[in-house]
Amino acid sequence: MDPDSPQVVVVGSCMTDLVSITPRLPRAGETIHGSKFFIGFGGKGANQCIQASRLGARTAMVCKVGDDSFGNNYIENFKKNNVCTDFVFQTGAAATGAASIIVNAEGQNAIVIVAGANLLLNSEDLTKASAAISRARVMVCQLEIHPEVSLQALTMAQKSGVKTIFNPAPAIADLDPAFYTHSDIFCCNESEAEILTGIQVKSASDAGAAGSVLLAKGCHLVLVTLGGEGCVIVSKEDPKPKHVTTHKVTAVDTTGAGDSFLGALAFFIAHHPHLSMEEMVKRSNHIASVSVQAAGTQTSYPHREHLPQDIFS
């Protein structure tokens, strides 16, 4: 194996977040004054990739951005975070994915997402990245690009013996059944689990029941994340649900915490494969809990040097 090849490859989305803070949400046709505006980097795929990179994994992102200033800025953001950009493709056919977000004084929001260039990532792009995918230790996918592209990436990775993590977000009720069998680790949150199984997830025992349904659909190992309540693990090897709790923290901003968890999990699978899944989840929970104690999405993701070093032993 090439010592410089990426250990974690993420196939997924990039979004530029355009955030306005306002006293209240405007009514139709109304113009109001906001108090603050900022631009952030988001998109589930990019978030997960950057968290894995900040923990010390060699990472590569496979995605598509526009041939515009947002696309150029995103490529620079990847480079600053030591993410390989060989497979960050630019197109003039669509703008970089963007989310226009209005947040009021109570923290309620209104969001418009335009996927843009994300939906132009295609089979040809995956073929260009195939060598990196086949040599990786872990490959991660979500659903903010065309589902068939994610499924193709998972299939390519599994054929090469690469560990696959699939995050069915945003969840779709008619998910192709092949996703269940092509995901070594199938990781969803409460609302995604409900959409996929029809089971309302209000507790750890509900999460276990939903996880069991997903196992029956062909998954090897299922993680149902529960925010501040931790995570439930069920697997074919150990079908009895296991609830891994996390220590309580005072959350400042929970945006992107699930992506922090997944990026951390990809790192631990790539770097510490000897650990039990329970231990990997425990450590990933801890990293996600650090992220919610700071504002923003990627801006809140911790770097390796700012975490307790025993997490990496």
Image: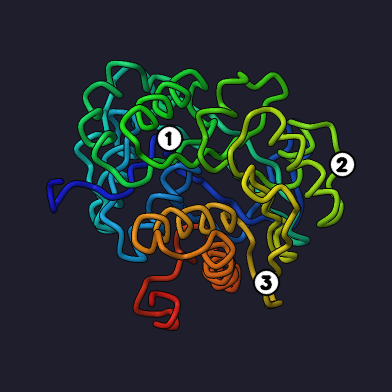
Q: Against 72, is 129 above or below? A: above
Gap between marks 2 and 1, in whole Å? 28 Å
CB within 8 Å, label 2 to label 1 = no
Image-quadrant location for residue 156? top left
Residue at (39, 82) in percent of width and height: 309
Q: What residue type is labelled 3?
A: Thr
Q: Mark 1 belongs to which amino acid?
A: Gly
CA–CA distance in space, label 2 to label 3: 22 Å
Label 3 with label 1: CB-CB less than 8 Å: no
Q: What element carries label 3?
A: loop
Question: What residue is rendered at 23% in x and 42% in y?
Answer: 85
Q: Which of marks 2 and 1 is nearer the N terminus?
A: 1
For image coordinates 63% across by 29% down, the residue present is: 218
Left or right side of 223 for 70: left
Residue 189 drawn at (x, y percent): 69, 47
Q: Is mark 1 on a helix, strand or loop?
A: loop
Crowd around label 1: few <14 · some 14–19 · many ≥20 (10 Å): many
Query: According to the image, label 3 marks what residue?
Result: 246
Q: Is residue 103 above or below residue 164?
A: below
Residue toward you, 182 or 239 = 239
Q: What residue type is labelled 2?
A: Gln
- Sequence-wise, which precedes: disc 3 or disc 1? 1
Which residue is label 1 attached to? Answer: 12
Residue 94 placement (x, y as % from top left): 38, 21
| Residue behind mark 2 | 200
For mark 2, give the secondary structure. loop
Q: Reading the chain from its start, which is encountered first: label 2 or label 3? A: 2
> Disc 3 to disc 1, how far (Cα)?
28 Å
Q: Residues within 10 Å of mark 2 (few under 14, many from 20)?
A: some
